[in-house]
Amino acid sequence: MSHATGCADARPTTDPCVRCDILLGLDGVRVEAVTRSSTAMRVMVSTPWQLMGCPDCGGVAVSRGRRMRVLRDVPHGDVGVQVAWRQRRWRCTEAACPRGTFVEQLPVLVAARGVLTRRAVTWALGQLRREHATIAGLARRLGVGWATLWRAVKPELERLAADPVRFAGVTSLGVDEHIWHHGDVRERGPKELTGMVDLTRDSHGRIHARLLDLVPGRSKKAYADWLTDRGPAFRAAIEVAALDPFGGYKAAIDAELADARAVLDAFHVVKLGTQVVDEVRRRVQQDTTGHRGRKGDPLFGIQTILRAGAENLTDRQVARLERAIGADEAHEEVYVAWRCAQDLRAAYRSKDATVGRGRAEKILTSFHTCPIPEVARLGRTLRRWREAFLAYFDTDRANNGGTEAVNGIIELHRRLARGYRNRDNYRLRMLLAAGGLLS
């Protein structure tokens, strides 16, 4: 297909540069020919002649002809696209110049020594960020190897990750850990990574959680060192710091974010209450029957009901719960533990934060005196976290939910890639997938 034929359908014009801009979207690149088969499209391009100076000495260079350089571009549907660039070669005429010969460079088209066009790299980044694509899958579509695509993408990710602007405006911070590998720690380092997440609300009060960083380890030091590296301006801007009930992260917040309110995550507090109910049920099961729960045992038949909210139970489920509790006087402990867990849940579900805080304060004064040991232990735990527990009701219900959502994105992309072997590559990919890189 000739150049004229290839561009005629787009827009009638006699200006070849305009036609090339329509086809490639690049100024100063001239399309010479387009050929296409059922599986591939090949676009031959060149640049107009211009006077060229030596990049070393500045002397006038003379032409040494052209060489063909084949680049990979964004696929057209299911058809792969190759850009065949007739790249000019030049020779410096200054005898003392060490440069000798050199080739023209066109950064708007491709990076030096690159195989993928700039547009293909941008397209790949968009697919990785928004479409849950994998490096291997995109490499197949572009007709290159995994390493070739990653070599083109990685420098851009590193540039975005090093930009301090992405840490600006953060006033609410979440922290959580996750396991990134299950291999030998002597070869691959710590299994745990601590993730920091921006939980700042927008002007409408909505949270758009984004991953800020991943650092190795799960400890006070891991979190505190990261906060120290961000600088005093960043730390001073943090007003709320949400966390799970882990003392190491709380110690880091106390040490580095003295002016921030630490907030214990509501989901994990309710989860602690549910775990207490399960522990009491298993203990009472063993005490009354001498064995673990089996089909037909009253407490075994209500284990899922005990994990549900009281307001969600049907009449039939309530009847099953009453029959199971009434089957043995010892089962009353299970019912009391369940009611305590429901009280804890009700504090968070209160529409009025003042009412919720009142219920939470009542929990703090009563749970630790409960004769059921598991409930008393929960009460002591909440009393140790008193300020962070009550802060939920004074900070517009701040929580770590956005951090858990980011962890879900991380888990999804780790499964898509079938695991990672390099922690640095893992960090960059997760920053891109979870919105941590601004472009």
Image: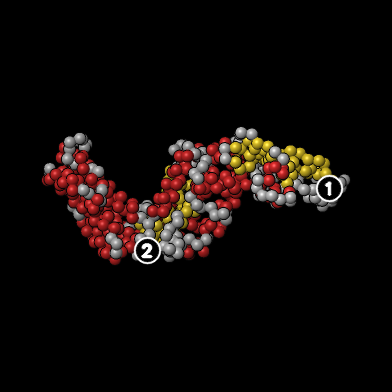
Residue found at the far top of this picture:
38
Q: Which class describes the residues within 10 Å of circle 1: few (<14), some (14-19), or many (20+)? A: many
User: Is residue 273 shown left or right of residue 148?
Assistant: left
Q: In the structure shown, which secondary structural element does the residue marked by tag 1 occupy? A: strand
Q: Residue at x 51, y 42 (%)?
A: 133
Q: In the structure shown, which secondary structural element does the residue marked by tag 2 occupy? A: loop
Q: Amino acid at mark 1?
A: Ala
Q: Is residue 332 visible?
A: yes
> Residue 102: where, in percent of width, then height?
78, 44
Which numbered dot is residue 395? Answer: 2
Q: Quadrant of residue 287?
A: top left
> Residue 214: where, in percent of width, then height?
49, 49
Q: Residue at x 64, y 34 (%)?
A: 37
Q: Amino acid at mark 2?
A: Thr
Q: What residue did someone put label 1 on? A: 61
Q: Which class describes the residues within 10 Å of circle 2: few (<14), some (14-19), or many (20+)? A: some
